[in-house]
Image (cartoon, rainbow, N blue to C red):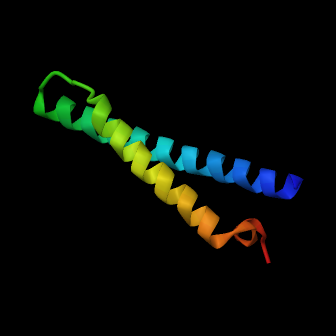
C-alpha cells in the first residue's frame, strides 16, 4: 500500500519538475529573444499553462505505463 502511494507521489513530483524545467526554458528563450530584438517582454501565461499541462500529463502517463519498476536501478 505504502509502495504504491510512494510511486504515485514520486511520479507526480518528477512530472511536475519536468514541466517546470520546460516552462523555465520557454521563459528563458522568450526573454533572451525579446532582449535581442529590443521589444518589451510580455509573458504569455496561457502558452505556459498549455505546455506545462502537456508535459505533466504525458510524463505522468509514461510513469504509470512503465510502472514502479522504472524507479528501480538494476
Q: Quadrant of residue 41?
A: top left
The residue shown at (79%, 51%) is: 5
Q: Residue furthest bottom?
A: 74
Q: Could you tell me residue 40's position as x and y percent?
A: 16, 21
As rendered, which of 63 and 41 lies closer to the eye? 63
| The C terminus lies in quadrant | bottom right
As rendered, which of 19 and 36 lies closer to the eye? 19
Asked if 47 appears above or below 5 in the picture, the reply is above
Q: Residue furthest top?
A: 40
Q: Is residue 11 left or right of residue 24?
A: right
Q: Could you tell me residue 53's position as x and y percent?
A: 42, 45
Asked if 25 appears above or below 35 in the picture, the reply is below
Is residue 28 in view from this perspective? no
Asked if 56 appears above or below 38 in the picture, the reply is below
Q: Quadrant of residue 49?
A: top left
Q: Is residue 27 left or right of residue 64?
A: left
The residue shown at (47%, 58%) is: 58
Q: Could you tell me residue 46's position as x and y percent?
A: 29, 33
The residue shown at (75%, 56%) is: 7
Q: How many marks?
A: 0
| The N terminus lies in quadrant | bottom right
Q: Could you tell me residue 37's position as x and y percent?
A: 11, 33
Q: Residue furthest right?
A: 2
Q: Residue furthest front?
A: 1
Is residue 41 in view from this perspective? yes
Q: Is residue 55 left or right of residue 34?
A: right
Amino acid at each position: 500500500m505504502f509502495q504504491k502511494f510512494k510511486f504515485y507521489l514520486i511520479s507526480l513530483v518528477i512530472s511536475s519538475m519536468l514541466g517546470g524545467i520546460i516552462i523555465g526554458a520557454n521563459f528563458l528563450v522568450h526573454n533572451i529573444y525579446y532582449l535581442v530584438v529590443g521589444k518589451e517582454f510580455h509573458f504569455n501565461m496561457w502558452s505556459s499553462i498549455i505546455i506545462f499541462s502537456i508535459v505533466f500529463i504525458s510524463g505522468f502517463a509514461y510513469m504509470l505505463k512503465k510502472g514502479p519498476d522504472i524507479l528501480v536501478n538494476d
